[in-house]
Image (spheres, rainbow, N blue to C red):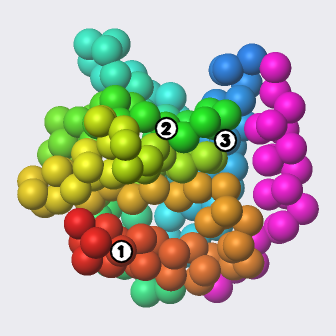
Amino acid sequence: MNPYDKKRITDLFVACDTSVTTAQKGKTLEDMACYLFETIPGIQIVKRNAMNQYDTEEIDVSIWNNKEREGLHFLNSIVLIECKNWSKPVSSIEVNWFATKVEDRGLDFGILIAVNGITKRNDEIKNAQSILTGYLRKHIQIIVIDREDILQLNDTSDMVTLIKNKICELVVNG
């Protein structure tokens, strides 16, 4: 278990909120994602902002998981992370686009860090949550981590528990 630097997380959120350009906002959230994950035992940041060979899809952060017991031993060796530092919840279109990236690479798990979560309103026709449920039928799990989740983290064991709980919630609630 490694402790997180709460001041660093707070400072990164302040930078996320006050960044002027979209690119700056995205990079700051990616910096936070890298910090949160590279602190977990057995995790290495492999690539950031990597384009596919056709220059049609970008992966924000990819990690290598050595599956250490104190870390993310229950996940695959490669995990993709998408970062959305939007002022509003992420739409179903963006959720689907990330899930497609995960699927196209033959993976069955991905993490979407969305500062303000994903759309969940009952009256919305295209509901981001329904996209996640649809991918479960394909045996692909996409979990969403938001600002409130991150602010509650004290150490890496909290992150491991959060990911386990998010997976269980996704599967059980469908």
Residue 146, quarter of picture: bottom right
Dot 1 or dot 2: first in sequence order is: 2
Is residue 167 rendered to the left or right of residue 151?
left
Residue 14: give x, y in percent of width and height. 86, 44
- Considering the numbered disc 2 on the image, is that residue within a helix, a strand or a loop? loop
Q: Residue at x 86, y 32 (%)?
A: 18
Dot 3 or dot 2: first in sequence order is: 3
Quadrant location, the C terminus = bottom left
Q: Nearer the viewer, residue 156 or 172?
A: 172
Residue 29, quarter of picture: top right
Dot 1 or dot 3: first in sequence order is: 3
- The reply to whether residue 145 is in sight is yes
Residue 6 is inside the magenta segment = yes
Label 1 Cα crowd, 10 Å radius (few <14 / some 14-19 / many 20+): few
Is residue 144 rendered to the left or right of residue 126?
right
Label 1 to label 2, Cα distance in Å?
19 Å
Q: Amino acid at mark 1?
A: Glu
Residue 40: give x, y in percent of width and height. 58, 71
The residue tagged 2 is: 90
Q: Give the vertical position of 3 relative to 32 (above or below).
A: below
Q: What mark, if any, has residue 29 been given in the picture?
A: 3
Q: Which residues are magenta?
A: 1-20
The residue tagged 1 is: 169
Q: Residue at x 28, y 72 (%)?
A: 173
